[in-house]
Image: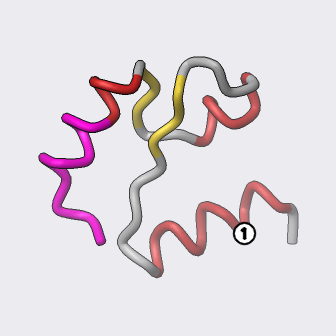
Amino acid sequence: MEIIEKIQQLKKQKNAVILAHYYQIPEIQELADYVGDSLGLAQKAAKSDSK
């Protein structure tokens, strides 16, 4: 199983959300549900119903 598929599978199993800072490499940003700055990430995390 490819690493991207494994990450997506675990994300679904764990009811997780992936947040990435815009400083992250593009490959990480592509997997993220939301990409933004520190404030935006904190706000998105606070509003998320994920674990």
Quadrant containing the C terminus is bottom left
Report x, y in % for residue 49: 17, 62
Classify 46 as above or below 44: below
Tell me if 28 is positioned left or right of 40 in this view.
right
Q: Quadrant of residue 29?
A: top right
Report x, y in % for residue 9: 60, 71
Q: Nearer the viewer, residue 7 or 41?
A: 41
Q: Nearer the viewer, residue 45 or 4?
A: 45
Residue 49: in magenta span: yes
Quadrant containing the N terminus is bottom right
Task: Kindly report the secondary structure that dominates the magenta region of the rendered protein.
Answer: helix
Residue, x 26% and y 47% (percent of image)? 45
Which range of residues does the magenta coloring cover? 42-51
Tag 1 residue: 6
Q: Residue furthest front?
A: 38
Q: Residue furthest bottom?
A: 13
Q: Secondary structure at mark 1?
A: helix
Q: What colouring does the structure picture have?
A: secondary structure
Q: How many marks?
A: 1
Report x, y in % for residue 15: 36, 72
Report x, y in % for residue 16: 40, 65
Classify 27 as above or below 51: above
Residue, x 34% and y 33% (percent of image)? 41
Report the amino acid beneath label 1. Lys
Q: Residue furthest right?
A: 2
Classify 1 as above or below 32: below
Residue, x 38% and y 26% (percent of image)? 38
Q: Nearer the viewer, residue 49 or 5?
A: 49
